Every structure is written in C-alpha cells, then in structure tokens.
C-alpha cells in the first residue's frame, strides 16, 4: 500500500515596477538564487528537508519535494517549498534595494506566462518494475485526462472564437498520450525510464499533464486518487473497464473547455461518456477494490473526498469553491466582471488570473482567501514550517536530509543526488541508497559518524 509520491513545481518569475517589467526573468532568477548558490556553490542544490531546489530551463525556479509515502505529506512538503521560495524572494528584494534597484519580485505557482509559454507541475509515483507503460492506455490515461474536473487550476484562454474560461492550464500544451520527451513533445505521461531507485524493482511514473494547485485539498485529491488507481492497475486479479480514449489529446482539450463537466467524449469502443461519468466509474471500482483489500486511513479519506467532490460536481460545479482551484478562480473572475462590467479578456481579469497564483502569503489572492477561511486546507502552519527544514521521516529523504544537515554543520564538502550520498574527501566515501522506502541505514549512520 505504500508508494513514493513526489511533486516537482516550476514557478513563473517576474520583477515589475508600476506594472512595467523591471528586470528580465534571467536577471531576477540570479538575484533569487544568489543565496542558494551560497548554500552549495551551485543553483542546483538538495536541502536539509530532503528536497531539491534548482533553476530550470527558461529561468524557472523549480522545487522538487523529498520522497513522501503518502499524499498528505506530499501536500505539506509542496507547501513548504512555497514558503522557502517566499523567503528567497524577500532576500532577493532586499538585495535589489541595497543596489538601488526598485521593483517587486513575483513568484507565480501557475503553468502559463503572458506569452502563452507553459511550464509544468510534475508528479512522480513509484510503481512496480513489472508494470509496463503500455498498460496505461486503457485505464490511467483516461483517468488522468478526466481528473482535471477537480484538479484543474483554471485560466482565461484565448481562442480563435474569443476568450473562454478553461478548467486546466496545461490542457492546450499536451500533444501525446505518452512519450520519453518532456519539452519537444509534451505527453500526459513521460515514459523515460529513470527510477532514481533500484532499477530491478522500481519504475518511476512521471505525470506531466497536471496543473499547479494552490488549494491543498485539490493537490491531496489529485495525488491520492492517482495512487488508488495505480493500486488497482497493479493488482492483476482486479478487473477494470477499458476506457481507452479515441483521441486522448482532443479529449483533454474538450474536457478543459467545458465548465459544466458534462460534455461527452468518445472512447475507442465508440461509447460516449463525460469526464464526470468516467470519474464516477473509477470511483465505483475503487470503492469495490477497497472493500476486498487492505487500506490505510488516508486512502479511505481520499475515497470519501473523491465521492463528495464528484457528487457536488454532478449537482453544480460551483459548489466546489472551497476545494477546487478552477471553481474558486471562476467565481472570482465572474464576480469582478459583474461588478465592473468587464469583458473576459479585460486586463483587470487577466491580472486577477495571475494574482491568484502569487505565492506571497501577504498579498497573494489565494492566500487572502485562505486567511479569511474561504478555502479549505488540510495542513497546519506548524506542519508546513517544520517541513521547511525537516524531511519526511519514513522514506529515504530522512537519510539524505540528515546527511546534509550534519555535513553542513561540520563544514564538510559533500555531493548528493536522489540516490547517492558522497563525502568529497580523499577517500571519496559514497553510500548508494537504492530503496526509496528505507529511512534507516547503518551505512549512512557510519558515514555521518565519520564526519
């Protein structure tokens, strides 16, 4: 029942003064990562909480959580990444002021810039080596294509027929069901075989179709339901209906363009179902599965949340204002439009679309809603603050985080990645941690003791 879950989030970055861009994204990123470079002499570092922080292509700060073995921990550590980047933003703005440069730095947890370029929020799930990617087409691909009805972040989309409100930000930028590429051909699932673990035992499922979520409940449901669907696929004794889509890419777009969640999409069998229909069928099969299989309290909570979410979507999608990002944003946009008689593509509306994703806990629109209790959350501030420095305690992330903490405290030179812990001394001592579920290791203990 345990599964390693990780979230990689790329952030949009800009620096503006009175509405005008002050610095280029590359220049802003250099200021933002100056403190990071001082931590590890590089803009690509692993942190004491087990996470990885680095500067991705296009000057996008990217934060990858340490390995978590449940969805709730992944939510907490994803949120901790926001707070770490907020602190870096504050430091960067102070350096700008010290150098006489005026401007405000914004970090946006979204997936689109003003020019229409897309950047990702990638999910990682450990799976059994025996589970071949070819088995995803009839079950996992349809599930991922349809879960956007509760996991989409929403945005104003410019089309040839004019602007519309779209459920998901990544939907227009997906071009394949599966592929080993991530930039040349953005797929729903990336099939590159890079397990970051024992290759004889593990695969790493790399999902890149999802949006970056501000709402913790949306993230929790996105990760938790995907884990449950994977459990059913991995169990060869349990049968699932074949939902192979006739055209997965067209389905992703059509679903995203329908805020009623009722538009029918065509399956390869000729059957036509809505995204809501397909999600209800997955929910029904999952309910039956958990009645005959062991389950954790979290899995049962995910199931309960999933059922209530789909039930509310069937009644009226706008009932999900507290837990679903696209619905929250849709209500904000429509409220602003009604108040000021604005078109959907009015600059004020487009600005609100972006401001919703501002990770500043002081000024971000989402965080203002959270402070007023308008949106739900599943973590506490105490948990998030702790996760900024303390890694998940039940996975390999604990070993990595403790090694980094002790090596830094003793001012020892070291190198780490997801699998290796290395002391850069004359002996070049290295420990290979191939099991992501292992949180205790005598070899690592001895390496730390030798520091």
Image: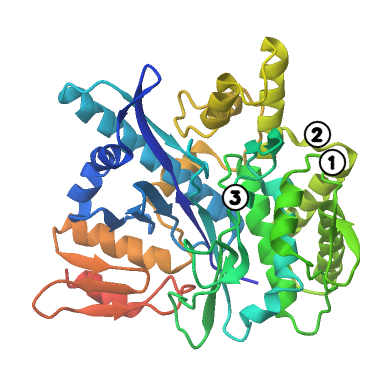
Residue under label 1, please give it.
Answer: 312
Which tag is nearer the camera, tag 2 or tag 3?
Answer: 3
Give the position of the C terminus as an image quadrant: bottom left
Mark 3: few/some/many CA within 10 Å (<14, 14-19, 20+): many
- Tell me which label, 3 or 1, sits earlier in the chain: 3
Q: Residue at x 57, y 84 (%)?
A: 129
Q: Nearer the viewer, residue 404 or 191?
A: 191
Q: Position of residue 392 (x, y in %)?
A: 46, 59
Would residue 322 be visible to someone looking at this image? no
Would you place residue 201 above or below residue 90 in this image?
A: below
- The secondary structure type at the circle numbered 3 is loop
Q: Nearer the viewer, residue 411 or 139?
A: 139
Q: Position of residue 422 (x, y in %)?
A: 23, 73
- Tell me which label, 2 or 3, sits earlier in the chain: 3
In the picture, measured across the screen, residue 114 lies left or right of residue 189, that is: left
> Mark 2 and mark 3: span between their CA atoms?
23 Å
Would residue 180 be visible to someone looking at this image? yes
Residue under label 2, please give it.
Answer: 319
In the picture, measured across the screen, residue 13 lies left or right of residue 376, that is: left
Give the position of the N terminus as an image quadrant: bottom right
Would you place residue 254 above or below residue 185 in this image?
A: above
Q: Nearer the viewer, residue 279 or 163?
A: 163
Which tag is nearer the camera, tag 3 or tag 1?
Answer: 3
Contact (Cβ within 8 Å) of mark 2 with mark 1: yes
Mark 1: few/some/many CA within 10 Å (<14, 14-19, 20+): some
- The secondary structure type at the circle numbered 1 is helix
In the picture, measured across the screen, residue 357 lies left or right of residue 391, that is: right
């Amino acid at each position: 029942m345990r599964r390693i879950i990780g979230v990689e989030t790329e952030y949009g970055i800009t620096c503006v003064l009175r509405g005008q861009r002050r610095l280029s994204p590359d220049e802003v990123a250099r200021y933002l990562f100056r403190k990071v470079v001082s931590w590890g002499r590089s803009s690509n570092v692993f942190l004491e909480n087990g996470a990885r922080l680095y500067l991705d292509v296009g000057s996008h700060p990217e934060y990858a959580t340490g390995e978590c073995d449940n969805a709730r921990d992944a939510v907490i550590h994803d949120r901790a990444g926001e707070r770490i980047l907020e602190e870096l933003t504050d430091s960067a703005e102070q350096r700008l002021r010290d150098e006489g440069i005026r401007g405000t730095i914004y970090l946006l947890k979204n997936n689109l810039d003003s020019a229409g370029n897309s950047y990702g929020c990638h999910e990682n799930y450990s799976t059994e080596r025996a589970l071949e990617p070819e088995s995803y087409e009839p079950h996992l691909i349809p599930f991922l294509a349809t879960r956007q009805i509760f996991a989409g972040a929403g945005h104003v989309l410019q089309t040839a027929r004019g602007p519309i409100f779209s459920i998901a930000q990544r939907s227009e930028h997906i071009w394949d069901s599966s592929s080993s590429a991530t930039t040349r051909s953005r797929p729903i699932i990336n099939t590159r075989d890079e397990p970051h673990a024992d290759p004889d035992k593990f695969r790493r499922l790399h999902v890149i179709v999802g949006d970056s979520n501000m709402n913790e409940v949306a993230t929790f449901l996105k990760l938790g339901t995907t884990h449950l669907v994977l459990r059913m696929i991995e169990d060869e004794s349990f049968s699932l209906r074949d939902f192979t889509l006739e055209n997965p890419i067209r389905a992703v777009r059509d679903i995203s363009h329908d805020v009623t969640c009722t538009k029918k999409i065509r399956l390869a069998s000729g059957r036509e179902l809505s995204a809501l229909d397909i999600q209800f069928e997955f929910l029904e099969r999952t309910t039956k599965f958990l009645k005959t299989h062991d389950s954790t309290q979290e899995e049962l909570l995910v199931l309960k949340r999933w059922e209530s979410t789909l039930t509310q979507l069937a009644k009226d999608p706008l009932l999900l204002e507290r837990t679903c990002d696209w619905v929250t944003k849709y209500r904000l946009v429509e409220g602003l439009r009604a108040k000021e008689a604005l078109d959907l593509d009015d600059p004020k509306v487009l600005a609100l679309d972006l401001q919703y994703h501002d990770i500043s806990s002081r000024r971000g629109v989402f965080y203002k809603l959270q402070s007023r209790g308008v949106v739900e959350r599943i973590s506490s501030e105490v948990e998030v603050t702790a996760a900024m420095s303390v890694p998940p305690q039940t996975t390999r992330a604990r070993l990595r985080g403790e090694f980094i903490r002790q090596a830094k405290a003793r001012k020892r030179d070291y190198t780490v990645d997801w699998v290796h812990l290395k002391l850069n001394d004359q002996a070049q001592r290295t420990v290979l941690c191939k099991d992501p579920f292992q949180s205790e290791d005598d070899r690592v203990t001895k390496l730390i003791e030798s520091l």
